[in-house]
């Protein structure tokens, strides 16, 4: 049986690619190695029965804001977003906690003398957040909103640490911006880490940082159900080892890391392109821990109990030191910890009276070091008695993350380094990064622009390239 397109991998980009092609009239097959679809959008019981944990992605500002997801009737297929009162909480040792909410005014009011500078930085973005996302979540092209992008040209290209120290005088604003920029998985002294801080803070102050009711798997399930109404076929439990085993198709789209593309289809790629993929740079990895808890995390600050996401890392200097150490191949004693407590707002995640929590920190690529104690000490720092609430835990070091999902090369969950050079040259130097030199073979994963996150835009833009090629 032949298809217009076969898609390898059922992460958000693979499923979006399938939907976009099916909407254009294509006959599409999606092949998934795991027993269930979803890629980074999976929810499983990994500690105790009844405790449902998100395996990779957990909090979804890009999911609710995605320009493509907003065109889909996903609510009709079971997806329900839950918005915590506070998008993000960032506690400090002096007892103060910054609450970033879906109100720019309320967030700025948390920041004392930096309120005016915060509003000056974010007001134009908040007022035109859809226009901003239209350009920020796109491949290299002429911007559709050039005046807005021109105003932010320098901040977007700046190192986060420099921007924070230049604009803000107090530690509260500096720390919360550093935590946002820490999602870049880059040293905060490098450009364009400020872009990550701007984007994630913008989303927190507009669409929020929601969780999906029932777990991140609910996003995958809604995408699959909708795709199937368009005629998309899905086969799970098929680990593709060679492109030759796939049925005939006009196009093969890989929702995989470049490493997997090389393994599956490398013999069809010219030597020069193979060398580009072999030189593709991956981020540091993550050490991940899931907890089954006897009750809520006993945060010292009440604000932290109103947020599904808590950045545990202290000041700008501490967060910057942690991220810098990882890039030197070190395992920081006080890592920057990204923590989610979904069951505070979604009771489907745990038995009555119990809770789940999810956290990770960055570690050197391929690390096998156990960071459980370091992570839990950081949480105890702001939530004394936390360890007494732990009923069970499940952990994965960076190498185990790759064993679970080969696309997390060395534990890199973001699809490769996104510095100034590789942000737009993902996976290689090309004006059409989704198309490989081999006829009919494309890459549509987070290793293409605009990069990591559950937004599906890599898959959407890859299909635009496919459709242009089909039109001649």
Image (cartoon, grey):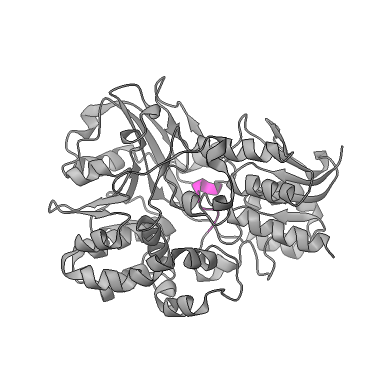
Residue 231 x/y as whole percent: 74, 38
Q: Picture quarter containing residue 437?
A: bottom right
What is the magenta segment's predominant secondary structure? Answer: loop
Residue 220 x/y as whole percent: 56, 38
**On the picture, is 130 further left or further right than 310?**
right
Q: Would residue 144 be counted in the magenta stretch?
A: no
The quarter in which the C terminus is drawn is bottom right
Compare residues 110 and 57 and report the one nearer the observer: 110
The relative height of residue 412 versus residue 78 in the rendered view (above or below) is: below
Q: Which residues are magenta?
A: 409-416
Q: Picture quarter containing residue 239?
A: top right
Residue 381 x/y as whole percent: 19, 44
Query: How many numbered tags mark residues here?
Result: 0
Q: Would residue 415 be counted in the magenta stretch?
A: yes
Q: Is residue 287 visible?
A: yes
Residue 21 x/y as whole percent: 73, 50
Q: Picture quarter containing residue 109?
A: bottom left
Q: Is residue 312 visible?
A: no
**On the picture, is 135 further left or further right than 351?**
right
Please report the residue visible at 16 percent of the width from the left and 42 percent of the height from the top. Answer: 300
The quarter in which the N terminus is drawn is top right
Compare residues 236 and 63 and report the one nearer the observer: 63
Please report the residue visible at 49 percent of the width from the left and 49 percent of the height from the top. Answer: 63
Which residue is outermost to the top?
Answer: 49
Which residue is outermost to the left?
Answer: 94
């Amino acid at each position: 049986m032949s298809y217009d397109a076969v898609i390898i991998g059922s992460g958000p980009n693979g499923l979006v690619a399938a939907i976009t092609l099916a909407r254009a009239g294509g006959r599409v097959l999606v092949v998934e190695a795991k027993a269930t679809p979803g890629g980074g959008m999976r929810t499983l019981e990994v500690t105790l029965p009844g405790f449902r944990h998100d395996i990779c992605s957990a909090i979804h500002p890009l999911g609710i804001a995605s320009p493509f997801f907003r065109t889909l009737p996903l609510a009709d297929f079971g997806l329900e977003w839950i918005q915590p009162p506070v998008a993000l909480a960032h506690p400090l040792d002096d007892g103060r906690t910054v609450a970033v909410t879906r109100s720019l005014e309320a967030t700025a009011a948390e920041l004392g003398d930096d309120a005016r500078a915060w509003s000056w930085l974010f007001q134009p973005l908040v007022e035109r957040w859809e226009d901003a996302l239209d350009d920020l979540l796109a491949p290299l092209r002429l911007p559709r909103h050039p005046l807005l992008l021109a105003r932010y040209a320098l901040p977007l290209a700046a190192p986060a640490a420099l921007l924070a120290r230049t604009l803000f005088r107090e530690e509260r604003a500096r720390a919360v911006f550093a935590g946002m920029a820490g999602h870049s998985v880059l040293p905060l002294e490098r450009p364009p880490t400020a872009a990550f801080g701007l984007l994630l803070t913008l989303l927190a102050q507009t669409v929020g940082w929601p969780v999906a009711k029932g777990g991140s798997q609910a996003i995958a399930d809604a995408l699959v159900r909708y795709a199937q109404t368009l005629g998309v076929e899905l086969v799970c439990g098929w680990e593709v080892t060679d492109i030759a085993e796939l049925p005939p198709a006009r196009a093969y789209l890989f929702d995989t890391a470049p490493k997997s593309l090389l393994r599956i289809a490398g013999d069809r790629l010219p030597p020069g392109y193979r060398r580009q993929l072999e030189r593709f740079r991956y981020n540091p990895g993550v050490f991940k821990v899931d907890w089954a808890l006897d009750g809520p995390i006993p945060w010292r600050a009440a604000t932290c109990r109103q947020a599904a996401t808590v950045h545990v890392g202290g000041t700008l200097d501490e967060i910057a030191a942690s991220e810098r150490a990882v890039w030197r191949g070190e395992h920081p004693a006080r890592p920057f910890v990204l923590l989610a407590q979904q069951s505070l707002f979604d009771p489907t995640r745990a038995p009555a009276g119990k809770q789940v929590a999810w956290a990770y920190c960055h570690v050197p690529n391929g690390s096998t070091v156990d960071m459980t104690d370091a992570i839990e000490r950081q949480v105890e720092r702001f939530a004394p008695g936390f360890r007494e609430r732990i009923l069970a835990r499940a952990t994965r070091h960076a190498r185990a993350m790759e064993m679970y999902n080969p696309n997390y090369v060395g534990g890199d969950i973001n699809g490769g380094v996104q510095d100034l050079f590789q942000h737009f040259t993902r996976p290689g130097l090309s004006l059409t990064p989704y198309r490989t030199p081999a006829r009919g073979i494309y890459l549509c994963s987070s290793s293409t622009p605009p990069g990591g996150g559950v937004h599906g835009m890599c898959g959407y833009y890859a299909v635009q390239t496919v459709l242009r090629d089909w039109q001649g």
